[in-house]
């Protein structure tokens, strides 16, 4: 049975040591994305810094990914951008899921994470009148 998720939520990424991160649920977006302030590819590894002055729950930790890929993402305004893509875990409604995230600068956005329909498909229905449904479930 599909869970009802709201238009926004606060979600966890345990492998990135990121907790209660603001996420916009966006059925118009195919891929999911996370704010990454610095990305360096060297020696077959991707070094990422998850820090943000605007988003206080970002912890400024450096994470190294041994496995990653590149993908082309088309934004809502039609611009194409090549991005790195990583695989990690996220927790929603007390359940751990694998999620693929593209890395981009979202510091000027209200939400540092965008959850797209590739991840949402077959797991969630969106109630646009609801917010923080997973987070509320976590507090119970």
Image (cartoon, rainbow, N blue to C red):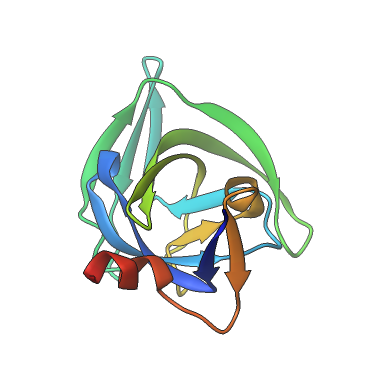
Q: Quadrant of the C terminus?
A: bottom left
The image position of residue 113, as x and y in percent, is: 46, 59
Using residue 14 as the reference point, say whether residue 109 is left or right of it.
right
The image position of residue 55, as x and y in percent, is: 31, 68
Q: Residue furthest right?
A: 78
- Up-down relation of residue 87 to residue 93 (above or below): above
Q: Residue furthest top?
A: 43
Residue in view at x 67 percent, y 57 percent: 29
Who is closer to the viewer here, 91 or 46? 91
Who is closer to the viewer here, 23 or 3? 3
- Up-down relation of residue 118 to residue 59 (above or below): above
Q: Quadrant of residue 124?
A: bottom right
Residue in view at x 48 percent, y 26 percent: 68
Q: Residue furthest front?
A: 1
Using residue 2 as the reference point, say whether residue 95 is left or right of it.
left
Q: Residue furthest bottom?
A: 129
The image position of residue 122, as x and y in percent, is: 64, 48
The image position of residue 52, as x and y in percent, is: 30, 62
Residue in view at x 51 percent, y 80 percent: 130
| Res 74 visible | yes
Residue in view at x 57 percent, y 53 percent: 1
- Up-down relation of residue 5 to residue 46 (above or below): below
Count of number-bearing discs: 0
| Res 54 visible | no
């Amino acid at each position: 049975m599909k869970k009802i998720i709201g238009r926004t939520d606060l979600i966890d990424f345990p492998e990135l040591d990121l907790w209660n991160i603001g996420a916009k649920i966006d059925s118009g977006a195919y891929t999911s994305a996370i704010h990454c302030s610095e990305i360096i590819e060297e020696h077959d590894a991707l070094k990422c810094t998850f820090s943000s002055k605007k988003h206080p729950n970002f912890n400024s930790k450096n994470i190294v990914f041994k496995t990653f890929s590149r993908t082309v993402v088309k934004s809502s305004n039609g611009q194409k951008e090549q991005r790195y893509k990583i695989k990690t875990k996220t927790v929603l409604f007390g359940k751990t899921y694998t999620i693929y995230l593209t890395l981009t600068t979202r510091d000027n956005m209200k939400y540092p994470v965008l959850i797209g329909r590739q991840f949402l498909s077959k797991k969630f229905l969106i109630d646009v009148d609801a917010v923080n449904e997973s987070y509320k479930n976590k507090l119970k």
